[in-house]
Image (cartoon, helix red, strand yellow):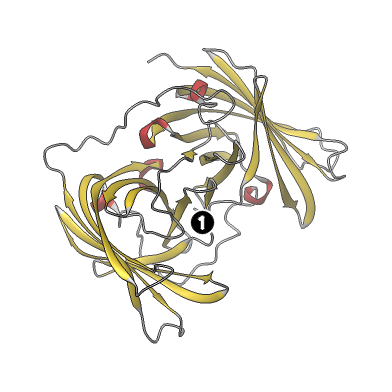
Amino acid sequence: MTSIRSVSLSLVACALVVAHAALPRAALAAAGTVAQHTGAARDGRHDFDFHFGRWTTHISRLTHPATGAPRWVTLDGTVVVRKIWNGRANLEEVEADGPAGHFENLALFVYNPQAHQWSMHFANSRDGTLVSPPTTGAFNDGRGEFYDQELRDGKPILVRIVWSNIRPNAHDFEQAVSSDGGKTWLTEFRAALTRDTKSNDVTTPPLAGNDPGGQGAFAFAEGKWKEHSSRLLRPLTGSKTWLRMDGVSVDSKIWNGRANIVELESDAPNGHLELLSLRLYNPQTRQWNLYFATSPVGIVSDAMTGGFKHGHGEFFTNDTLEGRAILTRFTFDSFSPASARSTQAFSNDGGKTWETNWINDYTRIPQ
């Protein structure tokens, strides 16, 4: 169940989209070295299997009006959860209504096999970003506890999320906060979920209309694609050695058509790559924030930001490569109903010159 973290009870205007055939960031190039093992040997990748499907939910949220005492408001709605990335991740969509307004949210759950933990990444509906930091934790004896530390009104607090009372057709979700280091907790969000046994359909309706260059910019990417990639080994070293990779990516529409999610599997002579990539639309700037994760680590990267103009998409971020500060640029172009191309390039001189290090060519697989 998606929590209320930094999400307003207003009509949601942003869109979260998982990028079509996006490439690993430089920060993900050394996958497997980021997370540290916690010592727990238990494999928890199936801990959220109970959550897959369609649910009805009754939500209670503690609000803090500008004047007057805090009060509880209630909402009722639907939760849809689907398995992605062969079960190493899942995606949750929530839509509910109540006296305080309309609540619509999305969360990405990603499993870190090294740490044996899950991270919950909540979409921010106001500015098209993922709330930072993610909430991280694990299940023990059928109860899931997840924590993070964040600032509210300039003060540090702890956030605790608990999944409990898990049964085949029902479970409970609760979020609490602590301002005294976990000595005491104030519950601020509760949700009771009951499986919708009449319909377990996890598909969502199509996007109403199109917004060229904006919310509908990636409609071309929906479907299944054969992908041929060329990757430059040891970029920014003068290397001329390229590695060839072949695979398949699947782009699926989600969140009432305002989003898609893409899962890529690719093989090369030196091994197998599994990549999850997402984009989040910012309706205020009309730009996209791109996020990436690879299966050995299960950690979502920082965002790349950009947009489309005249059929060409460009996205940029500050990054590091072998401890050096660089810029990363990612592009989409050469669109047609049956093909497309994307590229990644690095710059170590502030963007004056760029070295392309990854080229993807896509051919649509007829359905």
Q: How many marks?
A: 1
Residue at the far left: name it.
Answer: 198
| Among the 4 quarters of the image, the one containing residue 139 | bottom left
**Going by the image, does 178 lie left or right of 241?**
left
Q: Residue at x 61, y 42 (%)?
A: 24
Quadrant in which the C terminus appears: top left
Q: Position of residue 221 (x, y in %)?
A: 50, 24
**Residue tagged by mark 1?**
131
Write the residue at 38% across / 52% down. 9
Instruction: Name which residue lies at 49% across and 48% down.
Output: 295
Q: Secondary structure at mark 1?
A: loop
Q: Is residue 185 above or below residue 33?
A: below
Visible in this render: residue 112? no
Q: Position of residue 75 (x, y in %)?
A: 25, 54
In this rendering, the answer to whether 288 lies above or below 192 is above
Identify which amino acid the numbered label 1 is placed on: Val
Q: Is residue 224 visible?
A: yes
